[in-house]
Image (tube, rainbow, N blue to C red):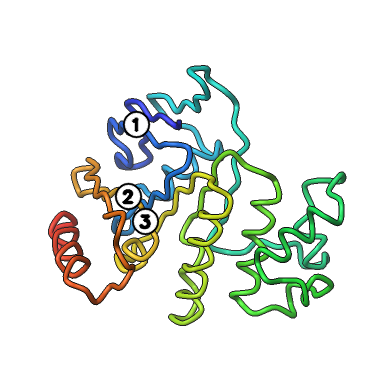
Amino acid sequence: MLEIRHLYKEYDDIIIDDLNYTFSSKGMYVILGESGCGKTTLLRILSNLDTSDKGEVSYIDNKHKIKPKVGVVFQESRLMPWLTVKENISFHSKKMDDKDLNKYLSMMKLEKFKNSYPSELSGGMANRVSIARALSYNPDILLMDEPFAALDYFTRRKMQKEVINIHEKTKKGVVFVTHNIDEALAIADKILVIKKDKSIKEFIIKDDYSRDLGNSYYIDLKKIILNELGE
């Protein structure tokens, strides 16, 4: 589990205020909120790229606190331009063998591009590489900060489906940040809406849902979420 207790963060204004929540190790969580509500700040604290002013973040395994391996995927792919796709994926590990490398290349459908450089890739391909790199670290949890925000609609939909497939294959917990309600509805098991007053409202998606955003279940849920966001 990942536990957040009484988390508080302030810059010029209060960004996170007494935040409490527990993530399970295998859930697909989407954090949803308007720009400036603290989504990215929260993810940076969870990934140890930033610290809170107050409160605690604990990773717990069998009732023991552990130091987790955290994989992070940013909005920008942040690939090393002088390295090939396969070199970018294995960058963090000198011991990765060809079998493991090929597993991640295959998972992200990158086999034909393994010797390509980032400048030769489309935006969607670059995102695939950054996800493969994060997964190859074999993280306990995968954190994703609006990774598809810069992609066109069709590429974005493909990548959303890829994330769902990865989650189902790896059974790893995913915390995904977005400001796009349709994206949240398309991929989440649970949606966490950060409201204007900094509180969190949780929405649990039905197990038997079809991911068809045009059906009445999604339409009604979207209206409720928009109301929670004050829109």
In this rendering, position of residue 111 left or right of residue 6: right
Q: Secondary structure at mark 2?
A: strand
Q: Is residue 176 above or below residue 139?
A: below
Q: x%, y% of residue 86?
A: 80, 63
Dot in front, 2 or 1: 2
Residue shown at the point (46%, 45%) measured from the top left: 43
Q: Is residue 146 above or below residue 121?
A: above
Q: x%, y% of residue 155?
A: 51, 79
Residue shown at the point (52%, 24%) measured from the top left: 61
Residue with the mark numbered 3: 188
Q: Amino acid at mark 3?
A: Ala
- Name which of mark 2 and mark 1 comes first in the sequence: 1
Residue 224 location, quadrant: bottom left
Residue shown at the point (21%, 74%) measured from the top left: 215
Residue shown at the point (39%, 61%) measured from the top left: 187
Q: Is residue 3 above or below residue 96?
A: above
- Name which of mark 3 and mark 1 comes first in the sequence: 1
Of 191 and 126, which appears nearest the observer? 191
Q: Residues within 10 Å of mark 3 (few under 14, many from 20)?
A: many
Question: Which residue is outermost to the front?
Answer: 208
Q: Secondary structure at mark 1?
A: strand
Residue with the mark numbered 2: 190
Q: x%, y% of residue 31?
A: 35, 51
Residue 8's label in the rendered image is 1
Of 104 and 3, which appears nearest the observer? 104
In this rendering, position of residue 169 left or right of residue 32: right
Could you tell me how far apart the alpha carbons at marks 3 and 1 are, in whole angstroms? 25 Å
Q: Residues within 10 Å of mark 1 (few under 14, many from 20)?
A: some
Q: Amino acid at mark 1?
A: Tyr
Q: Amino acid at mark 2?
A: Lys
Quarter of the image where the C terminus is located = bottom left
